Image: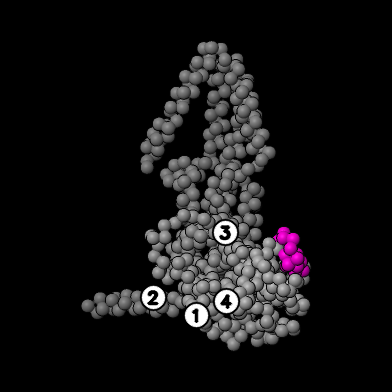
C-alpha cells in the first residue's frame, strides 16, 4: 500500500473522533463547563498513571510457553528455559532506541542459540556445530511464523508495517514534543482560562502515560520474541525438530487435542463416528513398568489390570528378565504395554537386572512399585525408589516418570478371616479399614513420601478376591498417565524420525542422482 493510501485510511479512521471531540468541546464552551471538564479528566488519567506504575504490568497478548505448561520437557529443557527467562528480564535494562534496532535482535538470536546449545553439549567447543541445517531452518520457520501471526493479530495495521514504519516509532516522541511547542502558545491565545490546567495535566499525566505505553509496547514485543525464540531453540537442541516444522506442528496439535495447559486430559465431546480408529499412524503407546520384590504379586496385578481384555494380550519376550504384555485398544486408538520385571531379592537387583531395568525405564511412562502388605522386608523397596530417583537425576535428558506404589495382599491384614469389601480405607472405621489405612501410612513413611501415592489392592482372582483396581488404582493412575501420554507421543515422534532416517537419505541421494544424470544428458546433447 502506498503512502498516500495509508494516510487516507488512517484519516478516515481518526476523522469521526476528531469531529466528535470538536463538537463536544464547542458545546462545553457554550455552556461554560470548559474549565471544569479537566478536573475528572486529570483525576482519571492520574489514577491510570498511578496504577500503571504500581502494578508494573507488561503486555502479554501472546501466551508464552512456560515449563509447567510443556509436559514433555525434561529437566535439562527446563534448565535451558532459565536462560530464556533471564534474557527476557534483561529487556527492562535496554533503552527504547536499542529495542528498535533490528541488529540487536540478530545479535540476541546468536547469543541465545550459543548459550542454550551449551546446556545440551557442554563438552563441545562449538555446541552449535552439532545442529543440522534442516533443523535450524525448521526452528527459524516456526519462530517467524509465530511472530508474523503475533504482529498481524495484535498490532493495528501490522500487516502493512514496513522497516521504515518500525524505525519511525522512535521519532514519535520527538514529533509529539514539536507539536507541543506549537500547540501551547496558540492555545494560550484562544483559551487562556484553561491553558494552565491543561498544560499541567499534559506534563504530569499525559506525557508519563505516553512513555509507559510506548515502553510497554516495545517490552511486549521484546519479551514475546525472546520467549518464542527460546522455546524453539530448546525444541531444536532436544532433537524434536528433526522431522521438520510441519511434522512438529502436527505432533503439537495432536498433543493439544488430549491435554490442556497443565498436561491433564481434556473432557471434550467428540464425534467418534468421524474418526478412523484404524489409522495406526495416529496411535500412541503407553508403557507401564512393574517392579517389586519376589512374590510381591506383580503377575496377579497384571491379570487384574487387564481384566476382560486378557484374550487380546500378546505376550512378547523382551529380555531375559523382562516380559512385555501388549494390549491393543482400538477403541481409544492406543497401545498399552506392561513391562513385567523380574522380582528382586532382599539385597536388590543384580547388575544385569539393573541394566535391563534402566533400559525398560527409558521406554516407560509410569512405574508401579508393587509391595506385599504382609512382607515385613521394606528396605529393598525403599532402596529401589532411591535408585530410581538417583538414576533420573543423573539423566537430565530424560523426563522423570512418576512412581506409584501398589500395596497388594491386603486381604492378609488383620482380621485375617474377614473379607467383606468394599473397604473405604481412607476414612472407614471397621478394623480391616483401620489396618489398611495404617499399612498405607507406614509404607508412605518408609518410602519417605517419594512416590505419588500408595494404593492398597487385592488381586487374588483365584479366590475371587479382587478389590481396589477400579475403585482406587485406576483413578490414581489417570492423572499420572496425562503426562505419560504426552511423553508417549513425543517418543513416538523420535521413533518415526529414527525409523525414516535411512530411507530419507537414500531418497535424497536418488533425487540428487536424477538431477546429475539429467544435467549430464543435457550437456551431452
Q: Is residue 268 visible?
A: yes
Q: Quarter holding the N terminus?
A: top left
Q: Position of residue 347 (x, y in %)?
A: 74, 84
Quadrant housing residue 207? top right
Q: Are marks 1 and 2 in contact (CB under 8 Å)?
A: no
Q: CA distance from mark 1 to mark 2?
A: 38 Å
Q: Residues within 10 Å of mark 1 (few under 14, many from 20)?
A: few
Q: Between tags 1 and 4, which lies in front?
A: 4
Q: Is residue 133 visible?
A: no
Q: Residue furthest top?
A: 31
Q: CA distance from mark 4 to mark 3?
A: 27 Å
In primary-sequence order, the first of circles 2 and 4 is: 4
- 490 or 468: which is nearer to us? 468
Instruction: State left or right for residue 4 relative to residue 382.
Output: left
Residue occupying the point 55% across, 35% down? 174
In primary-sequence order, the first of circles 1 and 2 is: 1
Look at the image and give the residue range highlighted in magenta: 426-442
Label for residue 508? Answer: 2
In primary-sequence order, the first of circles 1 and 4 is: 4
In primary-sequence order, the first of circles 1 and 3 is: 3
Label for residue 264? Answer: 3
Q: Between tags 3 and 2, which lies in front?
A: 3
Q: Position of residue 246 (x, y in %)?
A: 43, 63
Q: Are marks 1 and 3 in contact (CB under 8 Å)?
A: no
- 341 or 213: which is nearer to us? 341
In primary-sequence order, the first of circles 3 and 2 is: 3
Quadrant housing residue 277? bottom left
Q: Which residue is mark 4?
A: 303
Q: CA distance from mark 2 to mark 4?
A: 48 Å
Q: Which residue is mark 1?
A: 314
Amino acid at each position: 500500500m502506498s503512502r498516500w493510501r495509508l494516510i487516507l485510511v488512517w484519516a478516515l479512521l481518526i476523522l469521526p473522533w476528531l469531529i466528535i471531540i470538536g463538537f463536544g468541546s464547542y458545546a462545553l464552551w457554550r455552556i461554560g463547563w470548559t474549565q471544569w471538564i479537566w478536573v475528572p479528566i486529570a483525576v482519571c488519567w492520574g489514577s491510570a498513571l498511578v496504577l500503571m506504575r504500581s502494578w508494573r504490568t507488561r503486555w502479554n497478548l501472546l501466551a508464552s510457553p512456560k515449563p509447567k505448561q510443556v509436559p514433555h520437557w525434561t529437566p535439562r529443557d527446563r534448565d535451558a528455559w532459565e536462560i530464556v527467562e533471564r534474557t527476557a528480564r534483561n529487556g527492562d535494562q535496554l533503552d527504547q532506541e536499542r529495542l528498535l534496532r533490528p541488529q540487536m535482535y540478530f545479535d540476541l538470536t546468536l547469543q541465545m542459540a550459543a548459550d542454550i546449545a551449551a546446556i545440551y553439549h557442554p563438552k563441545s567447543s562449538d555446541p552449535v556445530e552439532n545442529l543440522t541445517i534442516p533443523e535450524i531452518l525448521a526452528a527459524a520457520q516456526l519462530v517467524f511464523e509465530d511472530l508474523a501471526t503475533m504482529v498481524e493479530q495484535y498490532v493495528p495495521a501490522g500487516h502493512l508495517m514496513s522497516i521504515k514504519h518500525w524505525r519511525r516509532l522512535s521519532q514519535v516522541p520527538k514529533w509529539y514534543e514539536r507539536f507541543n511547542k506549537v500547540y501551547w502558545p496558540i492555545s494560550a491565545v484562544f483559551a487562556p482560562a484553561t491553558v494552565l490546567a491543561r498544560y499541567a495535566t499534559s506534563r504530569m499525566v499525559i506525557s508519563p502515560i505516553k512513555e509507559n505505553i510506548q515502553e510497554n509496547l516495545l517490552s511486549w514485543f521484546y519479551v514475546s520474541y525472546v520467549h518464542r525464540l527460546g522455546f524453539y531453540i530448546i525444541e531444536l537442541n532436544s532433537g524434536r525438530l528433526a522431522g521438520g516444522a510441519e511434522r512438529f506442528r502436527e505432533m503439537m496439535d495432536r498433543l493439544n487435542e488430549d491435554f490442556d495447559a497443565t498436561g491433564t486430559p481434556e473432557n471434550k465431546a467428540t464425534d467418534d463416528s468421524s474418526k478412523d480408529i484404524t489409522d495406526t499412524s495416529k496411535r500412541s503407546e503407553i508403557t507401564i513398568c512393574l517392579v517389586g520384590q519376589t512374590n510381591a504379586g506383580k503377575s496377579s496385578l497384571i491379570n487384574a489390570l487387564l481384566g476382560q481384555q486378557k484374550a487380546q494380550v500378546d505376550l512378547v519376550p523382551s529380555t531375559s528378565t523382562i516380559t512385555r504384555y501388549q494390549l491393543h485398544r482400538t477403541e481409544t486408538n492406543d497401545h498399552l504395554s506392561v513391562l513385567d520385571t523380574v522380582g528382586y531379592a532382599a539385597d536388590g537387583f543384580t547388575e544385569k537386572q539393573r541394566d535391563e531395568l534402566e533400559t525398560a525405564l527409558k521406554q516407560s511412562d509410569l512405574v508401579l512399585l508393587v509391595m506385599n502388605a504382609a512382607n515385613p522386608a521394606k528396605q529393598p523397596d525403599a532402596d529401589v525408589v532411591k535408585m530410581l530417583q538417583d538414576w533420573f537425576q543423573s539423566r537430565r535428558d530424560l523426563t522423570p516418570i512418576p512412581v506409584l506404589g501398589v500395596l497388594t495382599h491386603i486381604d492378609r491384614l488383620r482380621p485375617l478371616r474377614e473379607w467383606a469389601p468394599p473397604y473405604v480405607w481412607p476414612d472407614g472405621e471397621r478394623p480391616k479399614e483401620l489396618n489398611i489405612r495404617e499399612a498405607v501410612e507406614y509404607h508412605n513413611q518408609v518410602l519417605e513420601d517419594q512416590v505419588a501415592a500408595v494404593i492398597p489392592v487385592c488381586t487374588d482372582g483365584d479366590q475371587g478376591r479382587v478389590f481396589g483396581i477400579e475403585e482406587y488404582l485406576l483413578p490414581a493412575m489417570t492423572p499420572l498417565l496425562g503426562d505419560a501420554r504426552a511423553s508417549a507421543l513425543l517418543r513416538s515422534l523420535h521413533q518415526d524420525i529414527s525409523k525414516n532416517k535411512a530411507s530419507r537419505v537414500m531418497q535424497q541421494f536418488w533425487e540428487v542422482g536424477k538431477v546429475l544424470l539429467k544435467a549430464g544428458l543435457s550437456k551431452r546433447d
